[in-house]
Image (cartoon, rainbow, N blue to C red):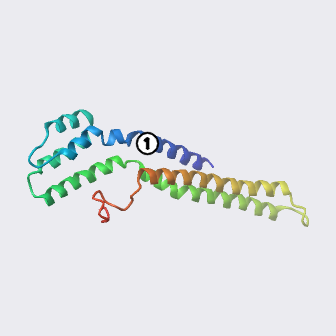
Amino acid sequence: MWPLLICSIVSVTIMILRGFALRRKIVMPLVIESEIERMTPAKVPNGCHVSCITILRRWLEITRVALQHLRGPRSENVEVVQTRARHEMVRLERGLIILEIIVGIAPLLGLIGAVSGLVHVFSHLGLSSGGGGSDTRQIALGIAEALNATVFGLSIAVPTLVGFTYFFPKSGSDVRGDGNARS
């Protein structure tokens, strides 16, 4: 049960920290979003540079890369921006792999607890003397241990899976959104 408790604490901590770090107004401030939507190759607004510098360094870097290649071929500009965006996505997704690991191991830890409880039940049955006079209290405790571990493991895995899916909804898709897997 201790490993399950640790998994639970780590999972909740990561979800809270990622929730604060990935708020929309922090990841994509409205000022930057509106400036980017108004951009044209002929006119690069200076306000975008100022907004980016004062609000968010990572968007400044992506915007800077886009502005540097704005007058070049579109395909080259798209490729350079995608490369920079992938780099920033890695930074934004920091810690989410731990949620994915917890989703996988929490039910397995619960299963280990269930097997351990059943081993206690059957070992107690084997050690009991007499014909059918086994201690039902010990059997019930062993079965309760098995069921509690399973429920606790699943009760950690399910909310963690929901949190992981919320923060990382498109696993296997790339920044472009065209269906090609990330490298």
Q: Is residue 179 left or right of residue 72?
A: right
- Residue at the spot 24% in from the left edge and 40% down from the top edge: 32
39 or 110: which is nearer to us?
39
Q: Is residue 171 above or below residue 4?
A: below
Element at label 1? helix
- Residue at the spot 25% in from the left edge and 51% down from the top edge: 85
Q: Which residue is mark 1?
A: 19
- Residue at the spot 28% in from the left edge and 48% down from the top edge: 88
**Residue, far front:** 38
90 or 27: which is nearer to us?
27
Q: Quadrant of residue 116?
A: bottom right
Q: Is residue 124 left or right of residue 111?
A: right
| Quadrant of the frame with the C terminus | bottom left
Q: Position of residue 91 (x, y in %)?
A: 32, 47
Q: Position of residue 61 (x, y in %)?
A: 21, 44
Q: Quadrant of residue 56?
A: top left
Query: Amino acid under label 1?
Result: Gly
Q: Quadrant of residue 79?
A: bottom left
Q: Is residue 160 left or right of residue 26?
A: right
How many numbered marks, from 0 up? 1
- Residue at the spot 42% in from the left edge and 43% down from the top edge: 18
**Residue, far top:** 54
Q: Position of residue 158 (x, y in %)?
A: 56, 54
- Pointer 1 local density, CA inside 10 Å: few below 14, some 14–19, many at least 20: some
41 or 4: which is nearer to us?
41
Q: Is residue 43 left or right of residue 170?
A: left
Q: Position of residue 110 (x, y in %)?
A: 62, 56
